Amino acid sequence: QVQLVESGGGLVQAGDSLRLSCAASGRTFSIYTMGWFRQAPGKEREFVAEISWSNSYTAYADSVKGRFTISRDNAKNTVYLQMNSLKAEDTAVYYCAARQNILSDYPYWGQGTQVTVSS
């Protein structure tokens, strides 16, 4: 099992920056990739970004490319999402997730952290 705890959400203005953190515990050695997803009110959950636990692979949704950066600190078992140039449409609950192989869905999820961007 892998446990995930997000932090760093909050209320910001359009154009501001925010950094989310996700601390992993448990069987962290089994993690293959970790990702960030978000769900806005009335919308389905969508992929934001993901990162390999062991190499330089990263991937981003088109809507956040050039504005968001995902990174990791293996020593702290933590993944970050640096969000710059925030827009009102980035308002959502942001979830951290982990999976153990590239072919599977994400089985492990955090509780989510609210990000609200006022315009």
Image: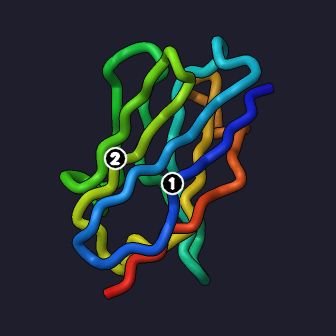
Q: Is residue 11 left or right of residue 108?
A: left
Task: Name the residue rendered at 51%, 61% in the picture.
Answer: 9
Tell me the number on the disc at residue 8. 1
Disc nearer the start of the sequence (1/2): 1
Q: Are marks 1 and 2 in contact (CB under 8 Å)?
A: no
The residue where tag 2 is placed is 60
Residue extending furthest toward the left: 66
Question: Is residue 49 or residue 24 the one in the foreground?
Answer: 24
- As drawn, is 116 to the left or to the right of 101? left
Q: Around disc 1, counting alpha carbons within 10 Å, would you say few (fewer than 14), some (14 to 19), or many (20 or more)? A: some
Q: Say if 109 sits above or below 8 in the image.
A: above
In this view, which residue lies farthest toward the bottom? 119
Which quarter of the figure is the N terminus placed in? top right
Closer to the observer: label 1 or label 2? 1
Question: Label 1 vs label 2: CA separation?
Answer: 20 Å
* Rendered residue at 26%/58% (across/down): 84
The kind of secondary structure element at disc 2 is strand
